[in-house]
Image (cartoon, helix red, strand yellow):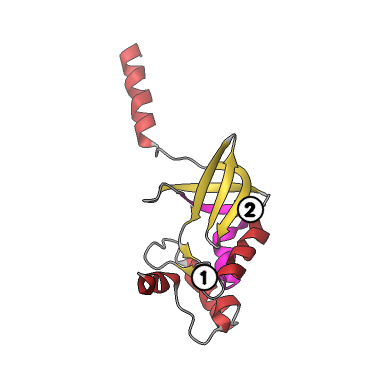
Amino acid sequence: MSTSCVSSVILALALSFPAWADFTGRVVAVADGDTITVLREREQVKVRLVEIDAPEKAQAFGNRSKQSLSDLCFNKTARLDDKGKDRYGRTLARVYCDGADANAEQVRRGMAWVYDRYVTDRGLYSIQDEARAAKRGLWADNSPVPPWEWRRKKR
């Protein structure tokens, strides 16, 4: 195979992979129930958990949601299934802390909603239905307000 042919194959392979890749790191901060900071080598990476939306800090269950995610992930090694970046520059990821799916676990605990607008894992809906039926977390309220509605009302 000629050098130019090999170069073409390498270029084609490089272009077929996404610009992002899965990675691991230590969780060094938890901002709220769906946002963490991960230390990747020597770089801090702000990460937004995909497919879920947790209550805002000033919203009912906001602090409990943050504490739940902290219990799951803070100071633990996390594996991130990187899905790209959001408009704020945060890495979007499915996050696994010590092997536990933090995104699904936040929903299971009633500490986050399935984010209808961005969900691709339809299995999260059955987890949410189970949490709602058991009145776990935010589902203990008679009519919890999803964060996307709460944010819209605050504008």
- Residue 2 visible within the image: no
Give the residue type at disc 2: Cys
Residue 103 drawn in magenta: yes
Residue 2 in percent (x, y) is at 33, 12
Q: Residue at x 59, y 41 (%)?
A: 39
Q: Is residue 60 above or below residue 80?
A: below
Residue 90 visible to an observer of this rendering: yes
**Figure quadrant of the C terminus:** bottom left
Residue holding disc 2: 97
User: Crowdedness of circle 2 by 10 Å Cα count: few (<14), some, many (20+)?
Assistant: many
Under circle 2, the secondary element is strand
Residue at the (49%, 80%) spot, across then down: 144
Task: Indicate the quadrant containing the N terminus: top left, top right, bottom left or bottom right.
Answer: top left
**Disc 1 versus disc 2: distance between alpha carbons?**
26 Å
Residue at 33% from the left image edge and 29% from the top image edge: 12
Chain part drawn in magenta: 91-112
Q: Is residue 13 above or below residue 56?
A: above
- Which mark, residue 155? none
Q: Which mark is residue 58?
A: 1
Can you tell which quarter of the image residue 62 is in? bottom right
Image coordinates for residue 68, horizontal then vertical, percent: 63, 65
- Number of numbered discs overlaid on the protein picture: 2
Give left or right: position of 87 versus 145.
left
Q: Secondary structure at mark 1?
A: loop
Q: Position of residue 5 (x, y in %)?
A: 32, 17
Q: Please check the rendered image and state whether residue 99 is part of the magenta-colored stretch, yes or no.
A: yes
Whichever of callouts 1 and 2 sits on the residue coming sooner in the sequence is: 1
Select label 1 or label 2 by which is in front: 1
Dot 1 amino acid type: Ala
What residue do we see at 52% from left, 60% from top? 34
Residue sitting at the far top: 2
